Amino acid sequence: MTEMSKIDTSTLLPQVTAFLWAEADLLDRKEYDHWLDLWQPEGFYTLPIGDTTDFANALNLCHDNDKMRRDRIERFKQGFSISSAPPALTVRTVSRIVIEKAEGDVITVRSAEHVIEDKFGRQRVWAANMTHTLVVTDTGFVIRAKVVRLLNSDGMLNSFSYLF
Amino acid sequence: MSLDMPKFSDLDALYSPDAKVATQMYEDPELFKLEMDKIFRKTWVWVAHDSEFPEKGSFKLSHVGLEPVIVVRDRKGVIHVMLNRCRHRAATVCEVKKGKTSSFQCPYHGWGYGLDGSLRALPYPEQYGDDFNKEQHGLQRLRTESYNGMVFATFNDDLEPLVDFLGPEVCRYIDLFMKQGGGFPVKVLGEHQFSVPMNWKVQLENTTDAYHFPVVHKSFMQSLDGQTEEIFRFLETGKGFVEDLGNGHSVMAMIPELIDLDENLDAPIPERFTDLAQELRDEGYPEDQVKKIVRAVGGAGFNLNLFPNVSFSLSFFRVLTPITVEKTDIRHIALGMDGGPAAANQMRLRLHEHFQGPMGFGSPDDAEVWERVQRGTKGGEDLPVLVNRGLVDEVPGTLGPRGHISAETGMRAAYKMWKGMMSQ
Ligand code: FES
Ligand SMILES: [Fe+2]
């Protein structure tokens, strides 16, 4: 239990849950600048294909460092991108939250995400397993890494005009 | 010979001599059925790249038109393409997308097939009588030929050999395209797959459509550094051309100075590749090889579009699989250097992720406009789709007409072939 000394374990799950829900809320409301603020600059936002863990040497759906994250948000915001102007509407639910590890300031959290998108009068449903690596700071959690494993990531997908 | 159905006996009404396409072409299910029969069952259809099943016994699943096939390399290294359908009661004999095996065993009643599709054994064969001939009950095999690693198959035994179907100009461009291995063999590194509610010909048109690039891909352009953005301004600079290469094939040369990657090796290394070049030098690669690899990393300067289902697009393969009249699966296959430096392959992967795939900065915008074409065809049944752009100033090329980079010359090449095949 000593590694968890900096963390109040009794309140950790509700705190982490509140953070993941707040993140989902930002993404649904497309508050992308706020979403960027949740990140440590050196962190990666990755949607792998299949079960690979060697993201650098594999083809991913996306593997965004700070610059790519910002470029992506810029693309969503500029209004030149046909797929994101207007964007699909989304409702996401994050649940089945499990704290896998808490060492020092670093917490690994697994969760389930469902995203429903609506565009052109049709709705699509996506499900994913997420792993967040969160770091505790004076002002709350920041994201060091986020890996979203879509079901059927190595199968036929559709194009996405939003984040998971 | 006339078409089976009188409904489509007037092919000029579907694709007119002045290059107008009828709305029916995108949404008539009966026409789609005819196309599957008269085109996809009759011509060479791309099924795989060599590197996807490199070893003896390795295989991958693919399609020829609507029909599921297995592409496999047998113990002698011979490539077979065969229907993924058991000869007993039609169960698929393989549902693993890719792998290695010594045989295919049907899960229903246990018929076993060799890597060449031959029926090896079946449980309790007595009830079939003495004259049951195993040799007549192998998996149905398709004619299979390949050129420079590209494997094609066909149901048509009377078809000309693959190299004749491709022709000398296409073969020359395939060879040029493969130079992006930078001296190493080209290898498939992965693929993005997505399904779009559109007719397959919407996609066929797009692989040879430079006209849309600055409009649809404005947000991609804005995410590039200035030097790279300049390269993609091929419409404004008017550089490049699009040329009919015969048999429905065409080339769209956007960046002519990158057609032959072995030329201009002394040109300065572009800014976006300076870090990579330094990394390769640090790893001990000699300067001439560094230049060659770095130049290859960005891909070739052209799209080579093969009728009916594959495009060699700058740095990747784009493959279309028709599913229904209004649904098409698209695969964007990322390529790298087999045995090449990891840093160079990583850069290729990141470039691929940047543009291609469900979350790229390009593909979602492409998918959106393709879907909009299909949605638009719900109105104005009698209005034609225009592919006549650039007819005014086309000039003769090596084999067929050559047009301005934004001309619809490549689409006309494809539709001419379409018409020829549909009239058979
Ligand atoms: S269906 Fe394959 S063995 Fe019966
Ligand atoms: Fe495009």
Image: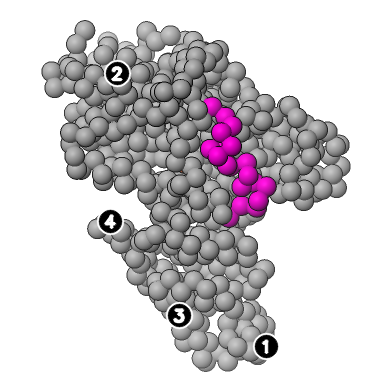
Q: Chain of mark 4?
A: A
Q: Give me the disc on residue A22.
A: 3
Q: Is residue B75 magenta?
A: no
Q: Mark 3, chain letter?
A: A
Q: Position of residue B249 (x, y in %)?
A: 45, 21
Q: Are marks 1 and 3 in contact (CB under 8 Å)?
A: no
Q: Residues within 10 Å of mark 4 (few under 14, many from 20)?
A: few
The amino acid beneath tag 3 is Ala
**CA distance separating discs 1 and 2:** 80 Å
* CB under 8 Å between discs 2 and 4: no
Classify mark 2: helix, strand or loop: loop
Classify residue A57 as left or right of residue B254. right
Q: Earlier in the sequence, mark 1 or mark 3?
A: 1
The stretch in magenta equals B223-241
* Dot 2 and dot 4 within a common chain: no
> As drawn, which residue projects farthest toward the front?
B392
Mark 3 or 4 closer to N-term? 3
Which circle, 2 or 4, is nearer the viewer?
A: 2
Q: Which residue was labeled with disc 1?
A: A2
Q: Label 4 belongs to which residue?
A: A120
Residue B115 in the image, given as x and y percentages of width and height: 47, 24
Q: Amino acid at mark 4?
A: Phe
Amino acid residing under circle 2: Pro
The crowding category of the residue bearing disc 1, from other C-alpha atoms within 10 Å (few below 14, some 14 to 19, many at least 20), is few
Q: Specify the amino acid type for callout 1.
A: Thr
Q: Please name the residue that numbered disc 2 is placed on.
A: B17
Q: Residue at x 53, y 68 (%)?
A: A131
Question: Which quadrant would residue B308 be assigned to in this image?
Answer: top left
Query: Disc 2 and disc 4: Cα gap in Å?
Result: 35 Å
